[in-house]
Image: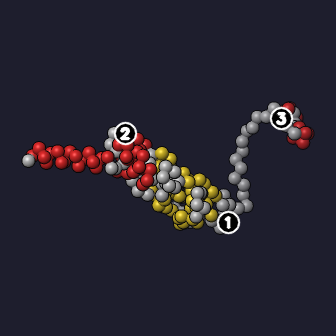
């Protein structure tokens, strides 16, 4: 009788492992993506890149629950718009990437977990990073940061060449 019970327990355990996915077990379900802004209080709209439908909205700081997949074996991709009166609009792309736990199927979830369960549940994907910070620029200002570019004189247009000043003359 004890042998039968052990056999049933072992069979049940193996059967459970075969019908589950490792990423689904460890890291399953939807994920929260946090959108913050400076200044706070900006309107956030999330649009699914594939369907072009708005799927979430809020006000910064916003914790938004998003699906990690866009169908079987397809990661999710979202366009996030952040807007606040008196500031320039800010956009960013949030994409799910392959979840490291997905490869746990090699040990625990088996082939069924790897090719059926995790892809079907979206657990094979994750959001990395899961937090985004946007610095909004005042509408009248510029966000261009000074930068140094080195160009060959031969690559300049004639208008650009006409504006060149020798360094010695520029230092006077």
Q: Is residue 43 left or right of residue 66?
A: right
Q: Is residue 87 left or right of residue 170?
A: left
Q: Secondary structure at mark 1?
A: loop
| Residue beneath the point at 40% across and 41% down | 103
Q: Nearer the viewer, mark 2 or mark 1?
A: 2
Circle on res. 106 = 2
Q: Secondary structure at mark 2?
A: helix
| Residue beneath the point at 45% across and 56% down | 31
Q: Earlier in the sequence, mark 2 or mark 1?
A: 1
| Residue beneath the point at 69% across and 53% down | 143
* Dots 1, 3 in contact, CB < 8 A: no
Is any part of residue 91 visible from this angle?
yes
Circle on res. 86 = 1
Neighbourhood count class around disc 1 (C-alpha, 10 Å): few under 14, some 14–19, many 20 upward: few
The x, y position of residue 22, in whole percent, is: 36, 46
Q: In terms of depth relative to the viewer, which is nearer, 46 or 50?
A: 50
The residue labelled by disc 3 is 155
Q: Nearer the viewer, mark 3 or mark 2?
A: 2
Alpha-carbon span between mark 3 and mark 2: 54 Å
Circle on res. 156 = none
Neighbourhood count class around disc 3 (C-alpha, 10 Å): few under 14, some 14–19, many 20 upward: few
Q: Secondary structure at mark 3?
A: helix
Alpha-carbon span between mark 1 and mark 3: 39 Å
Alpha-carbon span between mark 2 and mark 1: 52 Å
């Amino acid at each position: 009788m004890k042998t039968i019970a052990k056999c049933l327990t072992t069979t049940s355990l193996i059967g459970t492992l075969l019908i589950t996915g490792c990423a689904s077990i460890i890291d399953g379900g939807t994920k929260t993506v946090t959108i913050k802004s400076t200044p706070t209080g900006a309107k956030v709209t999330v649009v699914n890149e594939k369907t072009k439908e708005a799927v979430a909205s809020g006000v910064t700081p916003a914790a938004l629950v998003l699906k990690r997949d866009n169908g079987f074996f397809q990661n999710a991709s979202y366009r996030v718009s952040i807007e606040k009166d008196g500031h320039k609009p800010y956009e960013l792309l949030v994409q799910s990437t392959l979840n490291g736990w997905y490869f746990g199927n090699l040990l625990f979830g088996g082939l069924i977990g790897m090719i059926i369960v995790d892809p079907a549940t979206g657990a094979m994907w994750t959001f990395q990073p899961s937090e985004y910070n946007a610095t909004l620029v005042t509408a009248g200002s510029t966000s261009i940061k000074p930068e140094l570019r080195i160009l060959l004189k031969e690559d300049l247009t004639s208008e650009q060449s006409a504006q060149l000043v020798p360094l010695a003359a520029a230092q006077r």
